[in-house]
Image (spheres, rainbow, N blue to C red):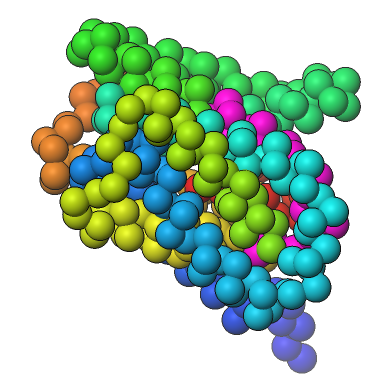
Amino acid sequence: MQPPRPETKAIPVPSAASRRAIVAVLGANVALAFGPWFVRLSDTGPVSAAFWRLALAAPILFATAAMREPRALRHGVALWVPLSIAGVAFALDLGSWHIGILGTTLANSTLFGNCAVLIFPLYGFIAMRRWPTRTQGAALLLAAIGGGLLLGRSAELSSRHLAGDLFCLLAGILYALYFIVMAQVRRVMPPLPALALSSAASIAPLLLIALGLGERIVPGDWTPLIGLALVSQIVGQGLMIYALGHLSPLVIGLALLLQPLVAATIGWLAYGERLTLLDAIGAVLVAAALVLVGIRRPRPPTAVPTR
């Protein structure tokens, strides 16, 4: 009599929806990483580029939302106060980020511009009046060390690079404010109408800021701005919103590593922006912090738009 064979556990096979979501989140981060390059290629001012990013994308977002979720879009009028606050926060975020993009490397702009992923949990700790876990504390420490290395390297290169990093860091803080408000909106509104309405609320503030700064508004070449609107605002954010509804925070956090990698590659090929060893260590530490925050953070009940 032969001994019974040991039971073998079946290896879980990702569902078709999960596979599509993984492809979507990878595509989203690649698309979003091209945003800083389009800003540099634009012949308008940086805030004007942010204005056109939303002004060109908003009609497409509204048309899509009207076809898919017309009732939610109509009911969004009742949320005009939080949507307006979110729109102004996002306008200030994009304006600050685009100014910073012109003053630092493409890799640094994506790292500091996405620091909201770290700041947003801090808001949760304060709101719930509790200390972070060990993993979250380690993530914040890694982010502080990595960010310090990157800022220190920028200061060594020139004050212009340091100013660019600080503008991108300010953008990340404003982006966290946008997250906080939009998290409340998303409790009662689907992602596409929320994105369309908050994007529309950002257009006028960006135009006023661009005019106040005396920037060139109308471009001579529309190609970079069309690319910015289609690739960053529609494709990038659209794919990310889809993925956020199907994947765990860990997978989203790991996928975020693509953004600085792709941006650094573009910066190297287009502008000769080579990373030094200290730059690479700082970038790895910040990226590791993003992943660690995603591991222990409970998955939110609703998705929050990202760049």
Left or right of 294, for residue 59: left
Left or right of 43, for residue 243: right
Q: Is residue 174 magenta?
A: yes
Measuring 70% from the left and 42% from the top, which residue is drawn there?
Answer: 84
Tell me residue 56's x, y (percent): 43, 59
Q: Is residue 307 above or below residue 73?
A: above
Give residue 141's quadrant in the image.
top right
162 vs 293, nearest the viewer: 162
Give residue 257's quadrant in the image.
top left
Measuring 80% from the left and 73% from the top, which residue is drawn there?
Answer: 71
235 vs 84, nearest the viewer: 84
6 vs 24, nearest the viewer: 24
Left or right of 175, for residue 157: left
Q: Is residue 215 in view from this perspective?
A: yes
Q: Quadrant of the N terminus?
A: bottom right
Q: Is residue 151 above or below residue 46?
A: above
Give residue 122's quadrant in the image.
top right
Q: Is residue 282 above or below residue 251?
A: above
Tell me residue 286's x, y (percent): 47, 29
Measuring 19% from the left and 51% from the top, which residue is drawn there?
Answer: 220
Tell me residue 184's x, y (percent): 81, 45
Q: Is residue 162 magenta?
A: no
Q: Which residues are magenta?
A: 172-192
Tell me residue 216's x, y (percent): 28, 37
Q: Main secondary structure of the magenta part?
A: helix
Q: How many numbered badges does the structure rendering display? A: 0
Q: Is residue 239 in view from this perspective?
A: no
Measuring 81% from the left and 21% from the top, which residue is drawn there?
Answer: 126
